[in-house]
Image (tube, helix red, strand yellow):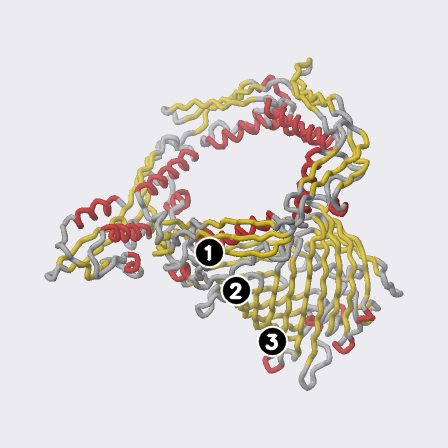
Amino acid sequence: MTGATLLLPLALAAAPPAGATVRAVRVEAEPAAGLAALAAIPTGAPLDPEAVRSAVERLFATGRFADVQVDLEHEADAALTVVIRPRPAPLFVGVRIAGDAVVSPAAAARITRLRAGDALWPARLERAGRDLALALVRRGHLEALVEPSAVPASGGALAQFRVRAGPRVRVGRVVVEGARAVSEVALEELARPRAGEIYRKDAAEAARERMRSRLARAGRWRALVELRETYDPGRGSMGLVFHVEPGPRTSLEARGVRLPPKLLAALRELVRDGGASADAIEAGAERVESYLRAQGHREARVRGTSAATLAGETIVYDVQPGARALARSVTLRDADAALLEGLRTRVGRPLEDAALEEDARLLVSRLEALGHFEARVETDVPDGGGDLAVAFLARPGPRARVSTVEVHGPPLPAAREERGPEELPVRPGLPYRLVDVARSRDTLLRAWRRAGHLDARVLPEVALSEARDEARVVFTIEPGPRSLVDHVVLAGLGHTRPEAVEREMVLRPGEPFSFERVLESQRRLSGLGIFERVSIAELQPGRVRRDVVVSVQEAPRTAWSWGVGYSEQDRLRGSVELTRRNLGGLGRTASLFGRGSFRGSRFQLNLREPWLFGRQLDSSLTGFWEEENRSTFDYSRKGGTLQVARAVSARTSLIVRYLFQDTAVYNLQVPIDEIDRQYRTYAVSGPSASLVFDTRDDPLEPKHGLFLASDLQLSMAALGGASYLRGYLQVTHVRRLRPDLVFVLSGRLGLAATFGAGSPPLLPLPERFFAGGEFGPRGFPYDGVGPKLVGSDGNFYATGGNALVLADAELRYNLTRALQLASFLDLGNVYPEARDVDLGALRRSAGLGIRYRTPIGPIRLDWGYVLDHQPGESRSHFHLTIGHAF
């Protein structure tokens, strides 16, 4: 910005005539699109130097200009025309290597991380040159020098790197000093690089660390390995010396108590990896103390020392566990004993002081939830060990309910497309809780700050009745000044069109400025998947009207992947996928996938449009074709899906789609009933709609909330498919009974019917409803509930039906942070037609399960037992899968 700050005073120093006003503002730049709004200067008024300076700052913030010159043109009637002449910045278009050609232009661009459209400012060029020089040093050119510069070129500028690589250094002599003292460890074989190889610093450092690690694993925990380098410029060689100080053999033992082998192994690893330092030994002592106190040794003391022995050195942990304390009884005085449910302190379990403190805080929060706003809880536990009586002494204090809630202050300013105000946690009729008052204050404060009042204050006042059983809550709003967005400056756009960014922004000119809106805009832009980096900052922090700079770095537009594999069915197979992002600069994505083998092939095309017809409608178009020659049959399948999704609210989504799929099966060599139902000759073509309402706190591991999903699908012969109407409804309610216990109720209903002359009564087999297996009822095998027929091989095969009824209940108990136990009851059945539904014929099963939490959902193992067993059925089944049943 140096050029502008020098030219601007000179331009304004021309002393425009007294009373001269600005008639027009002209921007002389190519292309000038979008610059007029950024260079806005008030017309019809005297020239404001501060307005000119702000316009220059906004133009510089785009990153498109190296300099901005401002001139004044005087006219005869004392009017002025402000002429702004930006000079384009040197935008990166390629790399040129001058001097020693030891690196290719493409490799240099990759090393320096230069992207098309980057402005080649001196600081950016200097950093790129430094990165390239360091890369050459790592390749053995220890004397490499790189001089970067920007060279004008068509459409921008080239990043030119003048390289003087110098000699490429090779390793001369390699010595491992001190290795003979520990010859059994064989350190010499770890030395890298070897004599005659190109010298690489990172390889030598990695070899040094491998030597130290091998010595530590061999029992020499205090081992040190030092790398000494000797460079001979005349010969272009590097001598390497690995100086080894192996230290004594070290062992570890605990005295005073028998520790579990797993804990001892963890201690050895901790102290060994820490080089047997004082800090590592102390950390081990703290780990042992934590273990013992969790076992009820409330006064455990551990001291770690180092002692020399004939064999070397021993790390000794002197353990004084003290007496072990167990909870003989747990009582709560002066409060309902039901509040003790779910505490860490329980009868028969070890006593832990940290758990007692945590339980006391939990009891306070439970009393406050009942309206005891001054609740206090203390613990009464005898000192020492043995079977101890634990008592929590409650002082609930008065209990009050909220009588009225008032908000004093101006009305909250409305903003375009703004969501409605959140409901306050504190409401008349509910128990008075300090935490609700604090949350309500935060809710009001958040709403006012989102409306642009960044310095707003919310002052809560609580007036208790004389009997202290009612609370009148008043919130007083002091809004302070309102900050608005003046201009939005876009920087870093190359292929991306400005409207693709502007439509995702919730920070718009004239709208409120808030940091919540900044974060939301940044999240939405990052979610497009077309930018590697997104940052949003203020150009003039602290002003009432603020200019916002949105800086982005575009991600590579093209990505591809491939794979080769082998399977018994396909034999040798290969696949390739090509993805093209940001089509047309509007965030669209297209991908093409192809897979081929000796037995079949599959092709799939996907197109995604985040804004359909200029509205925020996330739409996609998918088309596919596949064929395969199997051992007992052949099939071909083609089809496509057009889908449009719309977020109706924060909790509700609507999905509308059109589906076409045509499957043909031929060359059958076995009876048709022995083939999986997805491989049947049928066609479906028609629209469908899904509505999803979800208030769950976590879709993978919910603790509370409601999930409702409905789907209606129509297929018609006139459109090329079978004629039927199919509906499905699922309702799941999750409720937390206590911190470690969750109760889930779920119901699923499916109804379908065919129509039209000549249509069979049942839907095509792949479109029917099926039940049984891991998603319920779980006492039965996969598809084991509902109508069946006997195949030509004498086995039973599920035929499915046009109607489905399922009802489930499940209790989930958190055994540990990672493990969860469950008990469940499932009821359900499948009926040939909707008119056949009979709730008295629901099949029943109950069972137990265990879940292991993972980042992608719980790994679930369920055992279900059939409660209404019928002849020929198995009484129980195990099911292993990922995710909850509902």
* Inter-mark Cα distance, 2 to 3: 19 Å
According to the picture, the residue beneath numbered tag 3 turns out to be 685
| Identity, as a three-letter code, of the amino acid under mark 3 | Ser
Mark earlier in primary sequence (2, 3)? 2
Whole-percent x, y for residue 722 in the image: 65, 78
Query: Regarding mark 2 in the picture, which secondary structure is present there?
Result: strand
Q: Looking at the image, tell me whether mark 1 or mark 2 is earlier in sequence order.
A: 1
589 sits to left or right of 338: left
Q: Residues within 10 Å of mark 2 (few under 14, many from 20)?
A: some
Q: Which residue is mark 1?
A: 409
Residue 828 is situated, as x and y percent measured from the top left of the image, at 77, 66
Query: Dot 3: few (<14), some (14–19), or many (≥20) neighbours within 10 Å?
Result: many
- Farthest residue to the bottom: give it: 757
Residue located at (54% from left, 66% from top)? 648
Q: Is residue 174 above or below residue 425?
A: above
Relative placement, left or right, of 775 versus 684 is right
Foreground residue among 369 and 757: 369
